[in-house]
Amino acid sequence: MSRKSKEEIAVIYKQMQEYICKALEAGDGTGTFKVDNWTREAGGGGQTRIFQDGAIIEKGGVAFSAVHGPTPKKISNKLGLEPGIFFAAGVSIVLHPFSPMVPIIHMNIRYFEMEDGTHWFGGGIDLTPHYIVPEDAAYFHQKLKETCDSFDPSYYPKFKGWADSYFFLKHRQETRGIGGIFYDRLSATTDSHFQEILDFSLALGRLFPEVYTHLMQKNARIPFGLEQKAWQGLRRGRYVEFNLVWDAGTKFGLDTNGRTESILMSMPPQAEWVYQHEPLPTSEEAFTLIHLKKGIDWLSYTP
């Protein structure tokens, strides 16, 4: 088995974008994606698909990109790379629902290669509920564990811990949500191992619409009012803070002169900030806040 070329990986990831978009349209039942093709002046381009005003999804994006060109010094220094030509391809997704009872979800699968052959895969999935529901958290993490275990039993505990640390708002001392898995710099020394890592990333891509369709259908019809919508605005504000202050993908895209509209598609349609907001101690909002912590084992969680 020969190793897939970077061009072949780009085609495979583009096909994954198509698969995910069709599945999400079916899961929402009403909305459709608007296609926006774009090119990058320094090399490459992509396609951003934007979902707006669906039955369940208020705003979402499924973006594919395959870009290349000279590596900016800021990036090469940060990644510990020699100057040269880079190639990066991937699919990135963020979905913001109308209902505060349906969680925000993010996924990213990506491949990076330098002209000297240095390469790696990265990605992950994480869930950001406006209201943490232990049953949903257990379902989400169980699905991730099953997928990870089918490739390597060490993946889930390692990548779950990585997600807890990565999706963390240091200035708030709280996690962005209930985590998930996150991995980076998975490289291979053999062609078969290279294919295995690629297959792992594709398995995550196929898992994404499965888990989110389940959560949409389960929670979209739960009643909510103005109080819950106000809380959703505050949690969306935290999401904005993470993406603009800490997210490495956002920084990489902007530092490599990526397309700003596509990079910032992860932003919610509205967000709010209230000075020193404190929920009532016994409220569902307070329950959510006290569970925005690293290291929670959602698979064996008991209140």
Image (cartoon, rainbow, N blue to C red):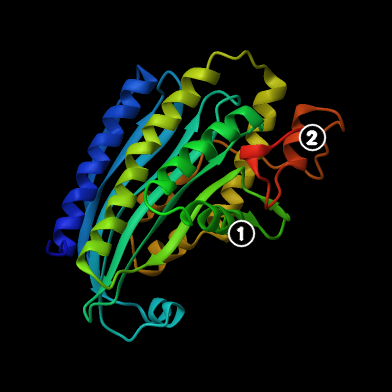
- 85 over 250 or under it: above or below: below
In the depicted view, which residue is nearer to us: 224 or 267?
224
The three-letter code of the residue at mark 1 reads Ser
Q: Which mark is residue 286?
A: 2
Cα distance between the residues tagged 1 and 2: 22 Å
In front here: 78 or 164? 164
- Specify the quadrant that holds the N terminus: bottom left
On the image, which quarter does residue 36 sit in?
top left
Q: Residue at x 56, y 36 (%)?
A: 270
Check the image and name the residue furthest to the left. Answer: 2
Disc 1: which residue: 165
Residue 285 horizontal/vertical position (percent): 75, 32
Residue drawn at point x = 69 percent, y = 37 percent: 301
Q: Pick the residue in front: 68 or 260.
A: 68
Task: Say what amino acid the circle numbered 2 marks.
Answer: Ala
Q: Is residue 226 placed above or below 5 in the rendered structure?
A: above
Instruction: Determine if residue 280 is in view.
Output: yes
Q: Is residue 128 above or below residue 65?
A: above
Compare marks 1 and 2 and give the one earlier in the sequence: 1
For the residue labelled by badge 2, is the local secondary structure a helix, a strand or a loop? Answer: helix
Residue 20 location, x and y as percent? 30, 35
Give x and y (percent) for residue 32: 30, 25
Which residue is at a point 37% across and 37% down the rendered structure image? 207
